[in-house]
Amino acid sequence: MSVQFISGNDAFALGVLLAKPAVISAYPITPQTVVVERLSEYVADGLLAANFIHVESEHSALSCAIGASAAGVRTFTATSSQGLLYMAECLPYAAGGRFPIVMMNANRALALPWNIYGDQSDSLSQLSCGWIQAYAENAQEALDLALMAFRIAEDARVSVPFMVNLDGFHLTHTYEPVDVPEQELADKFLPEFQTDNKIDFDKPVNMAFSAGPGHNKQFRIAHHNAMLRAFDAIAEAEKDFADIFGRKYTGALDAYRTDDADFVLVTLGSVSGLARSVADELREEGIRAGVLRLRYIRPFPGKEIAAILNGKRAAVLEKDLAAGRGGAVFTEVASVTAAATLSAIGGLGGEDIPAAAIRGIFKTLADEPETEVLYL
Amino acid sequence: MLKPTLHSGEFTYPEGTYFEAGYLTQKNAGWRTMRPVLDDAACIGCLQCYLHCPDGTIFETEDGKIGFDLDFCKGCGICVKACPKGAIAMKPEREAGQ
């Protein structure tokens, strides 16, 4: 174990190094580039015995990853924004094929207007593509999620690809002290990848086949159920993780001072720490505020969200705006509880979300219950 | 002739899109409006129809005659054009039972 002062991208790259993937295929794109650079350096320096495949596009990056996973090996890719959308055709292909590929997505705004800064429009536009989606809050969690993503995705009960999201720049490029585990402990946590979903001359199978109208739904339903089983795999992985590394995570949700709260702000990603400190300040002023961070949005922990928000009033703060509908995360949360009354849209195109703006969300929630949307 | 076995009833689906070599198929003749009918007496067994059938639904029966796999024949009529003796005719499905 060593503590290093590194960025979110560096931390994630170290997590992938510890997971020892056999194939990495990726195309660089701001703000994910550092991850790809680090991993290619590890391979070039002989620290990582992986086949690093330089591809000509993100579509090829994920196509290549699908092929590698179909060969039965641990596979990693990374992208961001337009790159994720360039992969879009392959996303459900990897998911429906049940290939447990791990991808890091550096959350970045979608064009147009062109913008390289961080918001969550990219991954939130792909909620239905069949991948697990987790959102890291800080660099430590980014590293830890890199390890857990392989474990959960490759769990035989799950076998679904896993997208770990890091807020572009706010998390990918911010330096923090990060506890980097020893390889020996990482090996203890993460078993070797084993699957029957592979090309194997000794045990031949039909792979990636068609299923017409009479059979198709069976595979869709099985995929959905596998995603729901991921909750168990997440819980078990986090328990082992705490035993081995001493850091505890709380499943799909991270609730802060919500038990006796009147007003709860639902968040995801790196803004959550600031939201918690604002909640602390408000508590000192007599306003019972809490924060509910979504660590996972796929699978969606709807019942748990509804239980935590029951009897309270909640706002959802997210960095996206689905034109013609509103906030994608608000839509999800409001679908399971009437407690969510206020949609706060902020951080679009990388705009800073200051503490005063978060305070404003709580104030609006408390003083103007009829307000439905707040553009920070 | 090896004809595909259709999975039905108690068939257990694989967890993902992979399983031991086999078929996962359905009868796809639902869109056929005309079906081929053979005049046995005119057929000379040249198998031109077998060679031309785009879906591989024509086969030689045990008694050396020509058969059509009507689970998979889509009714395109290419066999009619391929037959040098005019031994195959397309008959409307609604009359097929008569």
Image (spheres, rainbow, N blue to C red):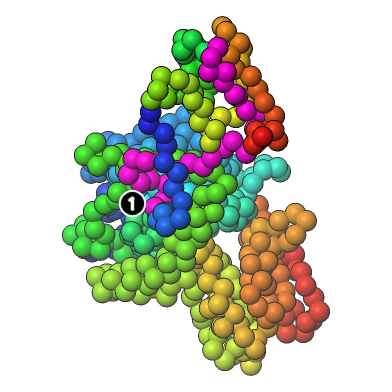
Quadrant of the image containing the C terminus of chain A: bottom right
Q: Relative to residue A192, is residue B26 depicted above or below?
A: above
Evaluate whether residue A118 shows in this view: no
Q: Amino acid at mark 1?
A: Val
Give me the residue at 37% from left, 41% from top: B22
- Considering every residue shown, the one lying at the far right of the view is A370
Question: The numbered mark 1 sits on a residue in which chain?
Answer: A
Q: Which residue is mark 1?
A: A16
**Horizontal and vertical percent position of residue B8:** 46, 51
Can you tell which quarter of the image residue A144 is in?
bottom left
Quadrant of the image containing the N terminus of chain A: bottom left
Evaluate whether residue A239 shows in this view: yes
Give me the residue at 43% from left, 31% from top: A55
Say whether residue A151 is left or right of residue A274.
Answer: left
Say whether residue A311 is left or right of residue B52.
Answer: right
Prevailing SS of the magenta stretch? loop
- Considering every residue shown, the one lying at the far left of the view is A184
Of A207 and A324, the residue lying toward us: A207
Decide whether residue A48 is among the magenta residues. Answer: no
Can you tell which quarter of the image residue A53 is in?
top left
- Considering every residue shown, the one lying at the far top of the view is B84
